[in-house]
Amino acid sequence: MSVNRIHIYWGIGVGIAALLASAGAYYEVTQFQGERTELKQELAYAKVQIDDLADLVQKKEEEVEVHKELLRIFRQQSNDTEYDLSQMRAMVQAATQTVEDIKKLEEADTQLLEKYSKVFFLNEHYVPAQLSYIPNDFVESDHEQQLSSSVLPFLLQMLNAMRGDGLDPKVLSGYRSFGYQSNLKYNHVVTYGTTEANQFVADQGYSEHQLGTTVDIVNGAIGVEMSKFESTGEYQWLLTHAHEYGFILSYPPSNAYYAFEPWHWRFVGKDLATYLHNSSTTFYEMPQRDINEYRIKMFDQ
């Protein structure tokens, strides 16, 4: 073998080694960036959990104070010949309500009022506690659609009210699993490219649909052409009345997360939806700790 050929092979080998080293370094940097992003998400989620725990501790402290005051009254009245029965009843009712509120907080699904659009991550194992099928006459899809069983009654009340006003609302999409959302995002990336797809389709784990509390609404006239929904009477009706049934528009014009989605409505409970409707703020602008205050009454009629 000639010296020149040896030099050529040696140069090729050095070049390949350099490329492999560069690829390895790029992989390590990319992996580090991904781990750093996941860590930030975990820290953000941990902060919310700590806030929730603080709220629960506060509730338990309030319960203790209520019982202390109740005990004081009983002791006082044991030495009195006359006492105020109405005061006793009020204290008992207050203590009972406090215990019931604490039980609701402990049993509530803490995920339902959290922010998932590029903020918190909902893992692949999350599935709503119970799902029910949306009646087919309200569905604009080749596939059956499901929603949280706790949310479905509110949705049906709203859709029936819309029908009563001469409208034709249809649900295009309800609950989506982690895997379904992953496939949906992949298909949109292939069709539209990553940049454009990121404007209107959430990554898996960041979709409100996985909570089972969110629906995409269209009408019979436009069918699956969601971009036309803004010009419909159904959309105008929802802007005016959706809060009365506990639903909010997640992504209004100029929101910081996705392109304007007039068809995308999330259930958050009547109290919170009404507060947001009457205020100048939106769900994703509201502090998470303030949102959590509405969790206890989320499913109250």
Image (tube, rainbow, N blue to C red):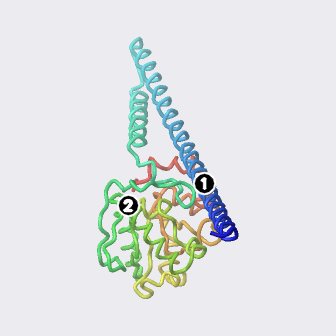
- Up the image or down, 40 lies above or below 175; here it is above
Q: Quadrant of residue 281?
A: bottom right
Q: Decide which of 183, 222 is in the foreground and name it.
A: 183
Give the class, few, some or many, for how many residues have Cα within 10 Å of label 2's Cα (few <14, many ≥20): many
- Per the image, label 2 sits on a secondary structure element best described as loop
- Per the image, label 1 sits on a secondary structure element best described as helix
In percent of the image, x 54 and y 39: which residue is there? Answer: 50
Q: Which quadrant holds the C terminus?
A: bottom left
**Labels 1, 2: front one:** 1
Residue 231 is situated, as x and y percent measured from the top left of the image, at 54, 84
Q: Label 1, on which residue? A: 28
Q: Amino acid at mark 2?
A: Val
Q: Decide which of 240, 156 is in the foreground and name it.
A: 156
Q: Amino acid at mark 1?
A: Glu
Say left or right for 119 vs 147. Answer: right
CA distance separating discs 1 and 2: 44 Å
Q: Which quadrant holds the N terminus?
A: bottom right
Numbered circles on residues, count: 2
Q: Quadrant of residue 126?
A: bottom left
Q: Decide which of 165, 284 is in the foreground and name it.
A: 284
Q: Label 2, on which residue? A: 151
